Image (cartoon, grey):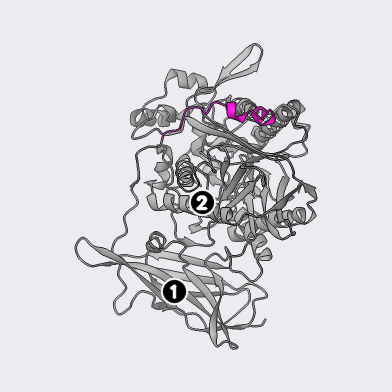
């Protein structure tokens, strides 16, 4: 998420889920699959592997054109599931266990949906979410024409679109919400895996509908999917200098002392955990209201269109006399500055249209300098990494990109391969809507699903591109990227409206690099417990009693959680259990997917590590006797060349929760 090499996994706050929805025509064979996965973005590698598995299971039922894979864009998930070299830098290569978990989880969620098909109805509703976003590049937004800006009341899209699903008996099945906000309420100092604000919204909705179930169980599925969130932050207090406390809401997002590295935005809470809950709850409450009031039924045929496009070489007709082109991918200097949600490295600042001789010199020596052609094409972007001209050991960025539209009756989902800014998204939706209008399909609801299919960073407007803040520096195919996408998505919309999707050219197939695993991540080695102790033993015990809003905490002799993740699918690391006097047994009330529990792993020396489990006792927790349990696996050395993985568990003493 933050591409910060220091930000490594140190535990678990909440689970990451794949949520799959299949809509099928009861009379015919047409289907559309929409998946929202709690990951930073869907990579080309993930998509190609998922589609390969679906084809071997289902033949031609689920294909390139009718399967949309969208990432929620949480910045607190694993990396290492990309095949393009740039993404290897901060996540230590291609990490096969991470890639496999994501691919298998997505396929499994589609399998479950496939098994649970039933006749039903769809309803759509829309409304504004307040107090949950700010534009993090307002100076870029102001570059857009005043006449265009005056048509909108805000510099972010506040509208949430909710698709509600019920079966023919009126039983509730689930919903998909599309809303534009970055899931960066958890900042880059966080080391706990979690699904951030939109994941918390899903959790609240599913907990409410699946009463009495543990998180991740129950039949009701609530997806909070990403949209055109490119310049949208949930850190609503805005940017302040970490050292002096003064505002740094300026075109460079820089502080007088410490420069851009000191300029950070914070959310509405006292810390990032609270901010995540506040923003997540805002989103959930709006979705709940829209869901309950949804009465506009979605009817009509299903259709889907998909093409592969070489985005480094698209000619765009701006008007009758003017044709422009996209460029080979490249990242500008401001890419290295990061944003107010996650600042970058060294002394890079946003909004630089000049290169820096020092960094350019280093780049030329290490990676080679950009060609004159690429330089000219990307103007006024000063190129930091000419990724389209870097091919060792594999290409650094994709050339072949997916464009895709799925129509479910009057709802058109535009699956976009990256992060469109607010105004870019507005222009794209408007262009597609007018294309549908002019080909006899008026009144379409057009939504953008972000971070789909392959990651290509950001897409700003031509005007925003000129000032080269972070989003513009990360618009990798040059100043005309948005115009190219608008042309392409209009083509897909036209094909759907005219029922001519079969005539669309497939386009050039993307490569699947012959790299199964290539990582600097150290392999798992044999572990040990301290003298006189064994794995799962308690090192620091719980107190005898706690009240609500306190934190129950226990520390165990632990082992690397990767052992469990790589050995047992769907391993649960912890439980909170309550003693039932009626059945004289312990009952699980919370697991590691609960937002009230935190699992911390800290690595010591010579193969030893500790695990601390925290339970943040929520208000309204039933008084009684409780305990905290830990489930892990350790690596045991059998001989010089052989280790085995051994499961173990540990438990705290029992403790009381007393009424306040």
The image quadrant where one finds the C terminus is: bottom right
Q: Where is 379 relative to 544, above or below? A: above
Residue found at the far front of this picture: 27
Residue in the image at 35% along x and 51% along y: 521
| Front tag of 2 and 1 | 2
Work out whether 203 lies above or below 658: above
Reply yes or no: does residue 626 show up in magenta: no
Mark number for residue 17? none
Q: Which residue is mark 2?
A: 106
Residue drawn at point x = 52 percent, y = 71 percent:
614
Q: Quadrant of residue 284?
A: bottom right
**Magenta span of residues:** 493-511
> Secondary structure beneath disc 2?
helix
Q: Are marks 2 and 1 in contact (CB under 8 Å)?
A: no
User: Which of the 4 image quarters holds residue 523?
Assistant: bottom left
Instruction: Determine if the magenta segment contains residue 503.
Output: yes
Residue 555's disc is 1
Assign a secondary structure to mark 1.
Answer: strand
Spatial separation of the CA atoms under disc 2 and disc 1: 33 Å
Q: Residue farthest to the top? A: 321
Residue 123 x/y as whole percent: 75, 49
């Amino acid at each position: 998420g933050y591409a910060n090499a220091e930000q490594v996994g140190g535990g678990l706050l909440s689970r990451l889920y794949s949520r799959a929805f299949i809509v099928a025509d009861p009379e015919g064979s047409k289907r559309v699959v929409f998946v929202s996965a709690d990951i930073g973005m869907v990579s080309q590698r993930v998509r190609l592997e998922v589609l390969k598995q679906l084809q071997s299971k289902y033949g031609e039922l689920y294909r390139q054109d009718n399967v949309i894979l969208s990432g929620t864009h949480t910045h607190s998930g694993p990396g290492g599931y990309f095949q393009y070299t740039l993404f290897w830098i901060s996540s230590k290569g291609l990490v096969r266990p991470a890639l496999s978990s994501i691919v298998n989880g997505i396929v499994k969620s589609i399998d479950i949906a496939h098994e649970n098909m039933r006749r039903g109805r769809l309803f759509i509703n829309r409304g504004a979410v307040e107090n949950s976003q700010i534009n993090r590049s307002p100076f870029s937004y102001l570059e857009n024409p005043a006449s265009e800006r005056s048509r909108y009341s805000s510099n972010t899209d506040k509208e949430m679109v909710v698709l509600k699903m019920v079966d023919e008996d009126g039983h509730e099945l689930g919903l998909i919400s599309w809303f534009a906000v970055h899931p960066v309420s958890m900042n880059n100092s966080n080391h706990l895996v979690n699904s951030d604000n939109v994941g918390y919204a899903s959790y609240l909705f599913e907990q409410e509908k699946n009463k009495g179930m543990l998180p991740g169980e129950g039949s009701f599925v609530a997806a909070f999917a990403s949209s055109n969130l490119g310049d949208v932050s949930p850190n609503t207090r805005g940017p302040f200098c970490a050292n002096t406390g003064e505002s740094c809401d300026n075109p460079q997002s820089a502080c007088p002392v410490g420069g851009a590295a000191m300029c950070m935005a914070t959310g509405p809470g006292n810390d990032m955990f609270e901010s995540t809950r506040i923003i997540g709850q805002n989103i959930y409450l709006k979705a709940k209201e829209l869901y309950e009031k949804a009465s506009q039924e979605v009817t009509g045929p299903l259709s889907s269109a998909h093409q592969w496009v070489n985005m480094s070489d698209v000619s765009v007709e701006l008007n009758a006399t003017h044709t422009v082109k996209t460029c080979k991918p490249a990242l500008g200097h401001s890419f290295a500055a990061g944003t107010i949600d996650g600042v970058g490295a060294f002394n890079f600042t946003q909004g630089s249209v000049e290169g820096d001789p020092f960094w350019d010199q280093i780049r030329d020596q290490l990676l080679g300098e950009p060609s004159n052609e690429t330089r000219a094409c990307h103007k006024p972007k000063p190129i930091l990494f000419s990724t389209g001209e870097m091919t060792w050991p594999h290409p650094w960025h994709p050339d072949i990109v997916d464009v895709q539209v799925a129509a479910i009756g009057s709802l058109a989902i535009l699956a976009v391969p990256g992060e469109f800014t607010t105004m870019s998204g507005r222009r794209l939706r408007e262009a597609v809507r007018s294309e549908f209008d002019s080909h006899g399909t008026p009144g379409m609801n057009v939504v953008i699903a972000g971070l789909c299919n392959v990651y290509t960073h950001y897409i700003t407007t031509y005007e925003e591109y000129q000032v080269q803040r972070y989003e513009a520096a990360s618009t990798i195919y040059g100043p005309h990227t948005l115009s190219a996408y608008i042309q392409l998505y209009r083509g897909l919309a036209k094909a759907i409206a005219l029922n001519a999707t079969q005539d669309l050219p497939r386009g050039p197939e993307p490569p699947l690099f012959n790299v199964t695993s290539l990582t600097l991540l150290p392999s798992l080695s044999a572990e040990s417990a301290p003298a006189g102790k064994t794995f799962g033993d308690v090192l620091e015990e719980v107190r005898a009693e706690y009240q609500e809003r306190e934190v129950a905490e226990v520390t165990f002799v632990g082992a690397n959680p990767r052992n469990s993740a790589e050995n047992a699918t769907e391993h649960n690391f912890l439980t909170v259990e309550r003693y039932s006097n009626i059945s004289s047994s312990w009952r699980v009330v919370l697991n590691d997917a609960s937002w009230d529990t935190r699992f911390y792993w800290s690595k010591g020396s010579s193969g030893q590590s500790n695990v601390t489990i925290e339970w943040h006792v929520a208000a309204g927790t039933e008084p009684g006797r409780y305990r905290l349990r830990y489930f892990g696996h350790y690596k045991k050395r059998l001989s010089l060349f052989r280790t085995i993985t051994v499961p173990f568990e540990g438990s705290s003493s029992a403790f009381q929760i007393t009424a306040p």
